[in-house]
């Protein structure tokens, strides 16, 4: 390791390069995102989630035979162990879904045959099992809290379709599957975002994948990160009508309330994922029929925000109405994000193990100095 000479404190680590990665690159000035060097615009509407995962984990898009084999491997791991299903049954019906997901993922460590094995081979197998099982957890939790029995996964259908099938108990239509797949592909990795950094910190101590993912789910939950889509949808529901947009936004700026789904630490000229999500949200809205206008409302909010200051919508903004029209209950939005981002978390954990360096930054001490010690019997 290079000598750690004292450096200046940087709030929020903004601009600090804290890892090297060959997974995704984010160019915030030009609004470009790539997975393994491939532009996200080329992947967005042409690949399946399984292909994106293969690309991230194995460094290349799968050929047809590899894709079939990879899908088969994933489908074979979707079922939950009986004890995990029983655990989910015991959760309070009012539990926050991300807490349910975080707890169930952590508990999967008990039954995974390789929990403590942090070799690359075992970590990939565990990543595959978690990627396969997380949608089953989310769907089972949702159905149980609604008083319904979980729906067993169907091995014959692909990842996005199977997730929707387990949520609703019905086979989704083609457009809805495309929308869910698009979401899963676009959210699969994003460089050193807060939850991925969390996963890397845990794995940098030689912590296992279940620990890293459990911690990452905790980091994703906050509304400055993955929780922003749910917060955006709740904002649109709160606004309620297009005529109320301007006064809502004016009031938000007057009271320094943040507009959810806007702004980004890295993208300063717009997020390249937005246009795909906006277009798909519109398609889903059109399919939903008359009386649905959350995309128009979101566009009206964007115009109103830009009258105050230059801020761009981020990935969570149009995800919110799109997931809403897909039929995902608003409070499950962040869980769906996790169902996608597990791909990136696993890939980053593998990179971190290969890097074999403990992540342990320094802190600038700003407390008192030279404080006199007072023995217990002399203290006030
Ligand atoms: C994502 C986010 C945390 C990035 O934060 P950051 O890089 O630390 O940038 P800051 O929060 O310092 O924002 C810079 C300025 O823009 C303003 N700003 C940023 N996002 C804003 C938003 N969503 N609504 C209103 N103002 C916002 C800040 O208030 C700050 O103003 P100032 O310069 O007058 O103090 C921030 O944009 C945010 O909170 N967005 C809303 C939550 C969200 O959508 N998160 C998902 C991210 S993918």
Image: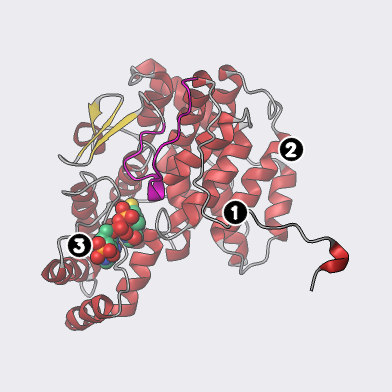
| Circle 3 Cα neighbour tier, 10 Å, few/some/many (<14 / 14–19 / ≥20) | some
Query: Between residues 272 and 140, which one lies in front from this camera angle?
Result: 272
Question: Dots 1 and 3: beta carbons under 8 Å?
Answer: no
Callout 3: SS: helix
Predominant secondary structure, magenta span: loop
The answer to whether residue 120 is seen in the rendering is yes
Left or right of residue 290, residue 2 in this image: right
Instruction: Give the magenta-colored segment's residue range.
Output: 1-18
Which residue is identified by label 1? 369
Which residue is identified by label 2? 110
CB of residue at label 2: within 8 Å of ligand 1? Answer: no
Q: Magenta span has 166?
A: no
| Front: mark 3 or 2 | 2
Q: CA distance from mark 1 to mark 2?
A: 46 Å
Q: Quadrant of residue 45?
A: top left
Place of residue 2 in the rendered image (x, y in percent of width and height, measured from the top left) = 46, 20
Dot 1 or dot 2: first in sequence order is 2
Place of residue 30 in the rendered image (x, y in percent of width and height, measured from the top left) = 15, 39
Q: Residue furthest right?
A: 377
Dot 3 or dot 2: first in sequence order is 2
Q: Quadrant of the C terminus?
A: bottom right
Callout 1: SS: loop
Callout 2: SS: helix
């Amino acid at each position: 390791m290079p000598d750690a000479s004292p450096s200046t404190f940087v709030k929020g680590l903004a601009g600090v390069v804290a890892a090297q990665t060959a997974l995704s690159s984010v160019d915030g000035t030009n609004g470009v995102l790539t997975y393994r060097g491939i532009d996200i615009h080329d992947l967005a509407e042409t690949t399946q989630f399984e292909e994106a995962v293969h690309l991230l984990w194995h460094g290349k898009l799968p050929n047809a035979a590899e894709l079939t084999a990879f899908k088969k491997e994933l489908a074979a791991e979707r079922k939950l162990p009986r004890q995990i299903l029983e655990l989910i049954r015991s959760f309070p019906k009012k539990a926050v879904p991300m807490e349910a997901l975080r707890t169930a993922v952590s508990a999967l460590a008990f039954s995974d045959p390789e929990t403590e094995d942090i070799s690359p081979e075992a970590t990939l197998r565990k990543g595959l099992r978690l990627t396969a099982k997380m949608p089953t957890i989310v769907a089972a939790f949702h159905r149980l809290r609604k008083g319904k029995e979980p729906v067993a996964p169907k091995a014959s259908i692909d990842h996005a379709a199977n997730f929707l099938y387990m949520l609703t108990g019905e086979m989704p239509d083609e457009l809805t599957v495309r929308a869910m797949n698009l979401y899963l592909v676009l959210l699969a990795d994003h460089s050193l975002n807060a939850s991925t950094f969390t996963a890397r910190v845990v794995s940098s101590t030689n912590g296992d994948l279940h620990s890293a993912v459990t911690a990452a789910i905790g980091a994703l939950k906050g509304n400055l990160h993955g929780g922003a889509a749910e917060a955006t949808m709740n904002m649109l529901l709160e606004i309620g009508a297009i005529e109320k947009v301007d006064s809502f936004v004016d009031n938000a700026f007057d009271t320094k309330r943040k507009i959810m789904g806007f702004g980004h630490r890295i993208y300063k000229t717009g997020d390249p994922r937005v246009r795909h999500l906006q277009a798909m949200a519109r398609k889903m809205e059109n399919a939903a029929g008359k009386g649905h206008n959350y995309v128009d409302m979101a566009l009206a909010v964007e115009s109103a925000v830009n009258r105050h200051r230059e801020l761009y919508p981020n990935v969570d903004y149009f995800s919110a109405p799109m997931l809403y029209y897909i039929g995902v209950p608003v409070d499950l939005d962040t869980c769906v994000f996790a169902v996608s981002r597990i791909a990136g978390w696993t890939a980053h954990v593998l990179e971190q193990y290969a890097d074999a360096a403990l992540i342990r930054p320094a802190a600038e001490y700003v407390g008192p100095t030279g404080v006199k010690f007072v023995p217990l019997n002399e203290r006030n």
